[in-house]
Image: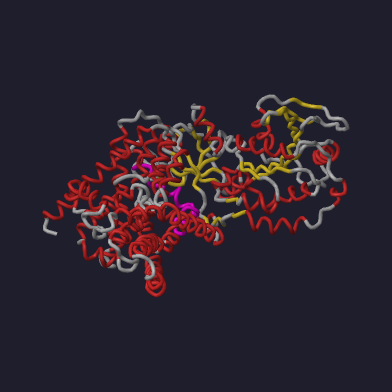
Amino acid sequence: MAKRRIALVGMPNTGKSTLFNRLTGAGARVGNWPGLTVELLAARLLLGDSMVELVDLPGLHNLHGFSEDERVARHFVETQPVNGLLVVLNALQLDRQLSLVLQLKELGLPLFLALNMSDEALSRGIRIDVTQLEQQLELPVRLVSAKHGQGVPQLKEALTQWLRNHPEPRSPSRAALEKDDAIEQDLDSLVRRTVHVPKDLPASLTDRLDRLLLHPWLGLPMFLLLVLGLFQVVYGLGTPLQDGLAWLLDNLKSAWLEPWATGLPGWAASFLLEGLYDGLGTVLTFLPIIVVFFLAMAVVEDSGYLARAAFLMDALMARMGLDGRAFVLQLMGFGCNVPAMMGARVIRSRSQRILTMMMIPFSLCSARLQVFLFFTTAVFSPRAAPWVLFSLYVLSFAIAFLTALLLKGRLKQQYDPLLMELPPYRMPTVRYLFRQAFRESGHFLRQAGGFIVLGVALVWLLTHLPLDAAPAGPDTLAGHMAAWVEPVFAPLGIDKLLSVALLFGFVAKEVVIGALAVIYGAGTEDLAGVIAQRMDWVQAYSFMLFTLVYTPCVSALATLRREADGNRYVWASVAWSLAIAWVLSFVFYQGARTLGY
Amino acid sequence: MTASSCLSRYPVGRCGTIVQISPDQDLAARMIALGLSPGRRVRVIRKSPFQGPIQVRTGQTDLIIRRSEAEQILVCPYEPPRDETEAFASQAMSHG
């Protein structure tokens, strides 16, 4: 078998040599190549089970360039057989650098694309659609950070696989070296389709915005106002859409599904309509709100404001043994706790990281938001509802901070200095926002199709078995379960049946509303009415408090276990959140009742 | 020329040249990666209340740094040539 060889190609200053060193370690040697006057750096690299020679070619801008370096690189490519070319591009400048890839493609050699400095690109808000790029270029593409080593093991793995497909070294097709013209046009359309670069606002505007948003005394009130405004937008835009969807689903049911289901046995019709349809339908009505919510989050994340939030909150966070980044992660937890917990990796000190991860589950995620939106709309007046919601956000922070304060002394402190870039403000691109909305709704729908179906089916079974008992009555399985936990929930003003819904919320909070629809046997539109009838605002708020705090969902716990590596923190998190949820609801409910509400 | 002092004690709006950065290797590497290396000019943009972090500008990059870390950076006053704005602008360009 011929000797395997990969040549490393890229423009100057793409971190090509850094990647070379990263891949090969210190074993590089300077080699003499027949026909070449310049010495090239080469090193052996173990990929899978075979030794491969990696050659670092001089940087080149253009395959047809005239500089000495470019001639050398071109000559090497033309004369030395290789198994393939590993092309390194600077992810920050893909718009300029992709032209080289298009030129190299013409050689007809196997190519592998590594986008270097991907971490920096990400921090500047540049997002690269790798799958799309792979499809468009018909090449394998990987993101790496040669400087920090991220993605390098994955790159090696992918290279091994790639080499298996190209076992024989070969030379390029010579004719291809002539062609050049169409490339510029290809490049434009390729970049437009695969790279998303947010527009920076002009520096002067950033300065003026910062003067207001980072004002020593106005900064924090402005921050609260922004958050409140965000929820007003979500509420104002999302709720009418939700109502519309609920109306649609209910009409669909009465006009279409109910007549169709008359032919089925009673229990089957009940399972399909009151179980699956009502349960799933109620969850689905939240789709518009979720989309609006994640759009708003995407705007905030992309705008560069989060770094400002870190700046504003750092002094307060320092008193809890944390820093501004922990606060930002807490904000990101508003979307979903799981990615926020994974984001805690940016914090180097283990104690700070664990502290942050123990706080994040109290961040009011979008799944809990559904429950709260439902209850606030059902029980409170439209004027009061946004404030009730806001109070829950404030409480979510208060409990997170309390957790940090209490836990701070228990962990051995390691200090991690805070030093971060304050990016200029940016306008997110509309295209990116649409993609984000699309992705989030896809995620939501997949969940609805997966475990939410399972959840509501299970709730139906629990509330309808045995079949001769009255649905959701005391004789059903759910009734027995509810009776069993009643002593715990009665002092909180939480209805027996609601406690069954809470049990399912442990798996995922998204199931809670669907479970309620099934338990009360109410359609998407009627459920709010049923709930308003069955509970007053004190009970509703007590239920919301408990839901806010009571336990991280299963995926959050799994993440905590993986990231904090140990069950200790998982158990601590569950026990602590259950305890504090109960105490909080108890104090609120009994207090409000004593005061005569 | 006045003696150097810590960046943390620099007043807002003052510009200085970095003389020395943190002795801690890890932190020094991060400082350099973000553009805080000896010889570079920094300007204090604002300080957050309650002893919070400070915002500094070096070249075209704005950074936030805690006062405790800024304390480890020694800065000597930068005396601008007559036309200060022009000089600062050209410096910003050269580091861009």
The answer to whether one can see residue A218 in this image is no
The answer to whether one can see residue B65 in this image is yes
Residue A84 location, quadrant = top right
Q: Which stretch is magenta?
A: A295-316
Instruction: State the quadrant of the N terminus of chain A.
Output: top right
User: Is residue A455 found inside the magenta-colored segment of the image?
Assistant: no
Q: Nearer the viewer, residue B1 or A365?
A: A365
Q: Nearer the viewer, residue A429 or A554?
A: A554
User: Is residue A312 found inside the magenta-colored segment of the image?
Assistant: yes
Picture coordinates of residue A405, whole percent (x, y): 29, 38
**Seen in the image, is A398 located left or right of residue A343?**
left
The residue at the point 63 percent across, 44 percent down is: B94
Q: Nearer the viewer, residue B88 or A49?
A: A49
The residue at the point 30 percent across, 52 percent down is: A394
Picture coordinates of residue A456, whole percent (x, y): 36, 56
Q: Nearer the viewer, residue A528 or B77?
A: A528
The residue at the point 29 percent across, 60 percent down is: A375
Picture coordinates of residue A244, whole percent (x, y): 39, 71
